[in-house]
Amino acid sequence: MPRYPYLLFDADDTLFSFPAANRVAFAAACAVSGLTFSDELLAQYEVHNSALWRQFDRGEVSKEFLVLERFRRFFAELGIDADPRLANDVHLTALGNSAVLLPHAAEVVKTLARTHRLFVVTNAVARVQKSRLSQSEIAPYIERAFISEEIGAAKPKRTYFDYVFAHVDGITRDNCLLVGDSLTSDILGANEYGLKCCWFNPDHAPNHAGLHVDYEIADLRELYDIV
């Protein structure tokens, strides 16, 4: 009998390579906005994007506001009259068409699906995540993706996990493990809901938040000995 027969996986930067997808998507947004892609422009955009996602995790802004505001702020900083709505639409479409997985993600998901029930728990934009997952090789092994936009609540809120637990038969706080890379949404959410958690931390970042981490891994294959 597995130690944790129910596994809740975050999506971006846990199973999927968000940086790879984001680079392509941002280049597409630049193209329709009259900009020439560069790493410097991407870094400028990410300052606004990351700040707004942190606000979203704290419940301070909505996702609808976030996805447009990041481009509004970016274009304002550059002093250009580009359409943030068009840039965002192109960006999200390109993101949804990128199903690049992180190293060993496909192997680990396929292997664990033989003995475990696998679910995705994500705060990503619904149209992006549904498109990406459907195109990926791990799609047949994921029973369901719980997307915050469709639920009406986001990690780390208790109401998000209330929904997940109400829609997965047999799951308990003792028989599941949440695996994710984000301290502010995945690990904090697990802590506040009383779940065991595994911090996927390939860059060996410090835990400045002081959150409780049951397991910490740098390679997804380390899950074999944990679950």
Image (spheres, rainbow, N blue to C red):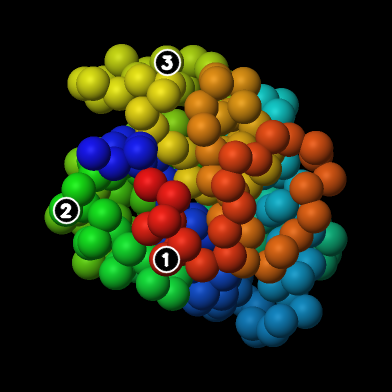
Residue 104 position, x and y percent, is 39, 72
Of marks 3 and 1, which one's residue comes earlier in the chain? Answer: 3
Give the Cα distance between marks 2 and 3: 26 Å
Taking 60 as reference, is 79 left or right? right
Residue behind mark 1: 221
Residue 114 image label: 2
Of marks 1 and 2, which one's residue comes earlier in the chain? Answer: 2
Residue behind mark 3: 162
Taking 128 as reference, is 216 left or right? right
Taking 28 as reference, is 166 left or right? left
Residue 205 position, x and y percent, is 75, 60
Which residue is drawn at the image coordinates 57% and 59% (left, top)? 217
Which residue is drawn at the image coordinates 75% and 71% (left, top)? 43
In the displayed structure, 133 sits above or below 126; it is below
Task: Point out the frontmost of discs 3 and 1.
Answer: 1
Disc 1 marks which amino acid? Arg
Disc 2 marks which amino acid? Arg
Q: Is residue 22 visible?
A: no
Of marks 2 and 3, which one's residue comes earlier in the chain? Answer: 2
Which residue is drawn at the image coordinates 69% and 53% (left, top)? 49
In the displayed structure, 8 sits above or below 13; it is above
- Helix, strand or loop under label 3: helix
